[in-house]
Image (cartoon, rainbow, N blue to C red):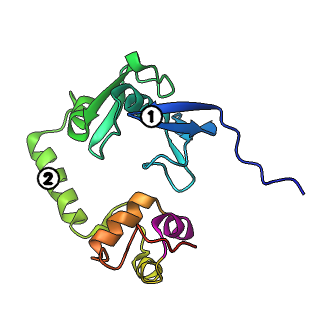
Amino acid sequence: MPAKSEKQVLYSVMIGDRVFNVTGRKRNKSGYVLLCINAHPNSDVAGYIMEHRVVAESYLGRFLNETEVVHHKNEIKHDNRVANLKVLDRGEHTIYHHLGSRRSKETRNKMSGLMKQRLKNKKNHPSYVDVDAELKKLVEEGRKATYISKKLNISRKTVYNKIEYLKLGETYDKHSSFSR
């Protein structure tokens, strides 16, 4: 019986001093190019991450943080040349795209207040996934973040955020040798 074949490496990308293998490439429904880089710390459950973020990270020589957004200068979502990309913080990017919109100060304040009120409860967030009980059980069983993320169909980042939110940090030992 032949050995289990690994995904073919299309090419490798260097971010800082680390090399990452790209094993897949596709476009999502919104028109953005996604790369399959399973080892990337910010990849989703399936191992995909937006190509424009990887290009920016490779150029800068560091990983982007959560508040940084990569803007396409010419608005073409699949044009991921370094010359077409600009790293902005989330607030700057929002202002850039809403500059010139015709909302009064009163309307903006009202919208902001309503959104802040709605999001005080994390369960009201549009991307909230109610997996707290299952996550707590898996953490108590000694499962690792990668296993938990695949089992609950959420990202590793969400697993770590929920571990912090649920105050399970002492229970979760991400450096343990136990894995399933």
Q: Is residue 82 left or right of residue 111?
A: right
- Label 1 element class: helix
How far is disc 2 from disc 1 in space, using C-alphas? Answer: 37 Å
**Residue at image x 15%, y 45%?**
108
Residue 1 point in image, percent of width and height? 90, 57
- Residue marked by disc 2: 110
- Residue marked by disc 1: 54
**Residue at image x 38%, y 25%?**
59
| Residue type beneath disc 1 | Val
- Which one is in front in this view, the residue at disc 2 or the one at disc 1? 1
Of residues 30 and 67, the one nearer the viewer is 67
Point out the tag, 2 or 1, that comes first from the N-terminus.
1
Farthest residue, direction right = 1
Residue 134 point in image, percent of width and height? 46, 80
Residue 126 point in image, percent of width and height? 37, 60
Q: Quadrant of residue 94?
A: top left
Farthest residue, direction front = 177
| Residue type beneath disc 2 | Lys
Q: Main secondary structure of the magenta part?
A: helix
- Label 2 element class: helix
